[in-house]
Amino acid sequence: MGCISYVNGRYLPHRRALVHVEDRGYQFADGVYEVFAVANGHPVDEAEHLQRLERSLGALQIAWPMAPAALQLVMREVISRNRIDRFGILYLQVTRGVAARNHAFPRAARSSLVITARRLPPPEPAAARLGVRVITLPDQRWKRCDIKSIGLAANVLGKQAALDAGASEAWMVDDAGLITEGTTSNAWIVTKGGELITRQPDAAILSGITRHAVLALAREHAVRFVERPFSVGEAKAAAEAFLTSTTALVKPVVAIDGTPVGSGGVGPFTERLLDLYLQHLNQAGS
Ligand code: PDD
């Protein structure tokens, strides 16, 4: 059975799930999105994702396509129609709607809502533990990276540059030489003194939901952390590094621009936080 997607009021086979050419998402990237993990058939950290969606919509002055409670019902229906009883990913996008092309807000457009979902094998701890390499490059994005905007051209270029360099992710660097975040993830280091560091959630980064969950786990398990920017030099000299996102979970970073991080393997802090995060995922819906 193929995937079923939701488009503006209708559940459609994925190949027929289409939006109009004058949707403002297509014309102007005038929209926002969320990516949820689904575990045990339930969206993980649903309330946090919906709060972030509310902030993104508010920042762009886009109306909710429907009341949040109704949206939760539609999400559940998409999960169920795609038979995601164990693990998967749900993508949700809201744009300012369909209107004749004109930069100014349209008077009468209704927000467009698209939801797609995919069933995936549950994360396997041994595979989750495999480390990745990152490169660094200048952050070329706009000044509101806290909004989960669908305008992702700079992120796309950065991700491709990483892949072309034989790495998995690019950590972007601001004009002061400080790392902001990855193209699709948040960036973390552990100093040789055992302190966990990740940038504070300001307009230079997306406030990741996985980041939030990992900080809550660190707090709960008395892991010392500080939210502050760190430089490329500090990252290369760190004992451990990792990245977080809904899709990558807690991913060990074993090299930065070809320089091994710490021993060049997966460090104990990262492994512990990954284990705690996997437990957090498995608790979804309970
Ligand atoms: N990316 N920073 C950026 C730029 C991101 O695109 C993402 C997520 C994150 C991590 O956020 P979270 O922990 O809420 O997933 C940080 C998603 C997964 C994507 O675009 O596919």
Image (cartoon, helix red, strand yellow):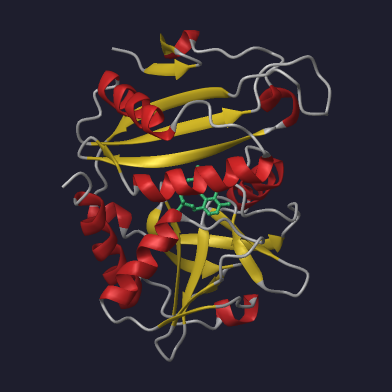
When the figure is inspected, residue 19 is found, relative to residue 244, above or below; the finding is: above
Q: Nearer the viewer, residue 61 or 113?
A: 61
Q: Position of residue 75 (x, y in %)?
A: 36, 28
Q: Position of residue 279 (x, y in %)?
A: 21, 58
Task: Tell me if 176 is positioned left or right of 260 in this view.
Answer: right
User: What residue sits 44% from the left and 89% below the top?
Assistant: 192
- Could you tell me if residue 267 is visible in this image? no
Q: Position of residue 196 (x, y in %)?
A: 43, 79
Task: Tell me if 193 is positioned left or right of 177 in this view.
Answer: left
User: What residue sits 28% from the left and 12% below the top?
Assistant: 1
Q: Which quarter of the figure has residue 280?
A: bottom left
Q: Nearer the viewer, residue 7 or 123?
A: 7
Q: Which quarter of the figure has residue 121?
A: top left
Q: Position of residue 283 (x, y in %)?
A: 19, 51
When the figure is inspected, residue 274 is found, relative to residue 89, above or below; the finding is: below
User: What residue sits 76% from the left and 22% below the top?
Assistant: 106
When the figure is inspected, residue 262 is found, relative to residue 271, above or below; the finding is: below
- Could you tell me if residue 200 is visible in this image? yes
Callout count: 0
